[in-house]
Amino acid sequence: MAAPRLIFAGTPDFAMPSLQILLEAGYSVVAVYTQPDRPAGRGRQLRASRIKTCAEAAGIPVYQPTTLREPAVQAELAALQPDLLI
């Protein structure tokens, strides 16, 4: 049986351990959905979430829609053919 195709959705730092465990266990995470980069710090520079940084380092495509409710985003999700969205 083939490994399940997973999509991970999360932004907060407390989501990091879950993503790391999935990657370390060898699961096929085919995409990561996270919130758009936000201004942070005194200079209000855009800053990526730790989830985005981790996914990019692992070579996983990152999607940053403002909402998952848009029909185009839902079509994009369906096109990835995930077995499970976490």
Image (cartoon, helix red, strand yellow):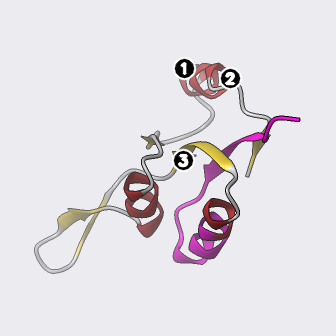
Q: Which residue is mark 2?
A: 78
Which quadrant of the figure has residue 19?
Answer: bottom right
**In the displayed structure image, the side of residue 49 where residue 43 appears, left or right:** left
Q: Quadrant of residue 40?
A: bottom left
Marker disc for residue 72: 1
Name the outermost residue toward the left.
43
Number of disc labels? 3
Does residue 53 appear left or right of residue 4 in this picture? left
Question: Marks 2/1: CA distance?
Answer: 10 Å
- Is 40 displayed left or right of 51 in the figure? left
Give the mark nearer the N terminus: 2 vs 1. 1
* Element assignment for label 3: strand
Residue 38 percent location from the top left of the image: 31, 61
Q: Which residue is mark 3?
A: 32
Residue 43, quarter of the rendered image? bottom left
Of the two numbered discs 2 and 1 in the rendering, the one whose residue sits closer to the viewer: 2
Above or below, 82 against 32 in this view is above
Sequence-earlier tag: 3 or 1? 3
The residue type indicated by label 1 comes to Ala
Q: Amino acid at mark 2?
A: Ala
Q: Is residue 71 magenta?
A: no
SS state under label 2: helix
**Is 44 or 25 nearer to us in this picture?**
25
Label placed on residue 50: none
Residue drawn at (54%, 40%) of the image:
67
Q: Start and end of the magenta stretch?
A: 1-20
Question: How far across and down, in percent of the image, does residue 51 sit?
Answer: 48, 63
